[in-house]
Image (tube, rainbow, N blue to C red):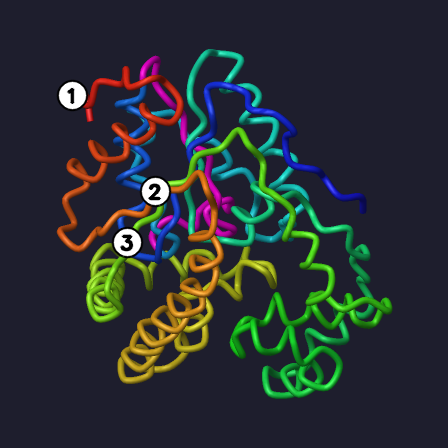
């Protein structure tokens, strides 16, 4: 696989990239930005599980009302039986950006898979391709065995990959088996990012985001998360079945209410851990020059959109964006 270099020069409208922790209000802000940008914007999903059809509640997909108001791309584009790769997302996202710009509109990328965002900004790593046989062998191991192997062959990667991040652990081991270290390959991301993107980052205190995560999980259960997972059992492939929330509920479906309650508590715990891992990625993004970080503590997405539009206007449009529609 060859490296996809970032865009060498600015093209307008620039891509707006919205990042922040899970349950932090990214999707709501992205929709408000798309509605408030001159000429309008269209959202591009950067969440690795929102690509799957039928996985709606547990992935916190934008509502149908939001998707009617603002076009959304790369949502519901894959069946849950199939694997979905970073390379596929990158190619489709790049094409979507070009298509949106051709209509004179603004691409707005949003989602919780920060590896997708990193790749959009810096390009694909020049890494070895997948090895199906090795992947199957590694996938048969439990988390503890995978972790032990990674610490032995690439301790630097082990420091940055969460112990529960099975997919990234397997990928790092796959790369190591091909004679490379993924931690070394990632130095390719130290070059300047693409110049045709502006990043909006949402910052939350840890205690507040943890509380919002707990509230989101409870809301998902009220909306029918368990029933959604049950309906998907016949059609979930290994990648979709490993999704946060789905994996825990799947493991408890044959048990009683006590098992299910324990599983839902695990969803909260593991989502909080996931948010902790996200903070590592977000610290990397904070070094970007064309980025604006906002204190999201108030949770007022209208005010955050107004602040963002003013900054985008200053960076890209000479101060001409009206914040009224947001």
Above or below: residue 107 compared with residue 267 = above
Q: How many marks?
A: 3
Camera-nearest label, 1 or 2: 2
Q: Which segment did they paint magenta?
A: 38-57
Chief secondary structure of the magenta portion: loop
Give SS at disc 1.
loop
> Residue drawn 64% across and 72% down?
169
* Quadrant in the picture for residue 267: bottom left
> Residue drawn 53% across and 29% down?
196
> Residue drawn 70% across and 37% down?
5
Q: Position of residue 296 (x, y in %)?
A: 21, 51
Camera-nearest label, 1 or 3: 1
* Quadrant in the picture for residue 29: top left
Residue to which mark 1 is pinned: 324
**Gap in Å between the C-alphas at discs 1 and 2?**
20 Å
Mark 1 touching mark 2, by CB under 8 A? Answer: no
Q: Closer to the N terminus: mark 3 or mark 2?
A: 3
32 to the left or right of 244: left
Q: Position of residue 43 (x, y in %)?
A: 41, 31
Which numbered circle lies on residue 24? 3
Residue to which mark 2 is pinned: 292
- How many neighbours does mark 2 have within 10 angstroms: few (below 14), some (14-19), or many (20 or more)? some
In front here: 308 or 39?
308
């Amino acid at each position: 696989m060859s490296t996809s270099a970032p865009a060498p020069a600015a093209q307008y409208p620039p891509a707006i990239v919205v990042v922040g922790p899970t349950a932090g209000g990214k999707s709501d802000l992205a929709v408000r930005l798309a509605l408030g940008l001159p000429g309008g914007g269209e959202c591009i999903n950067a969440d690795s599980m929102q690509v799957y059809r039928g996985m709606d509640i547990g992935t916190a997909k934008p509502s149908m009302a939001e998707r009617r108001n603002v076009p959304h791309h790369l949502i519901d584009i894959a069946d849950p039986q199939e694997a979905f790769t970073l390379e596929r997302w990158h190619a489709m996202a790049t094409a979507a950006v070009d298509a949106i710009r051709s209509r004179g509109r603004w691409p707005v990328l949003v989602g919780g898979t920060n590896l997708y965002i990193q790749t959009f900004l810096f390009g694909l790593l020049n890494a070895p391709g997948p090895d199906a046989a090795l992947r199957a062998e590694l996938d048969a191991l439990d988390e503890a065995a995978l972790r032990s192997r990674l610490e032995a062959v690439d301790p630097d990667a082990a420091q940055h990959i969460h112990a529960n991040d099975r997919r990234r652990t397997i990928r790092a081991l796959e790369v190591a088996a091909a004679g490379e270290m993924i931690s070394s390959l990632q130095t390719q991301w130290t070059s300047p990012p693409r110049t045709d993107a502006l990043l909006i980052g949402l910052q939350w205190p840890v205690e507040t985001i943890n509380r919002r995560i707990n509230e989101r999980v409870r809301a998902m259960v009220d909306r029918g998360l368990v029933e959604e997972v049950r309906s998907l059992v016949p059609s979930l492939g290994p990648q979709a079945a490993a999704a946060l929330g789905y994996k825990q509920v799947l493991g408890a479906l044959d048990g009683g209410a006590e098992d299910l309650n324990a599983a839902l508590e695990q969803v909260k715990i593991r989502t909080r851990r996931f948010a902790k891992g996200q903070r590592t990625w977000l610290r990397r993004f904070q070094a970007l020059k064309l980025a604006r970080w906002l204190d999201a503590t108030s949770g007022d997405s209208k005010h955050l959109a107004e602040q963002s539009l003013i900054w985008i206007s200053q960076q890209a449009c000479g101060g001409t964006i009206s914040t009224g529609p947001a």
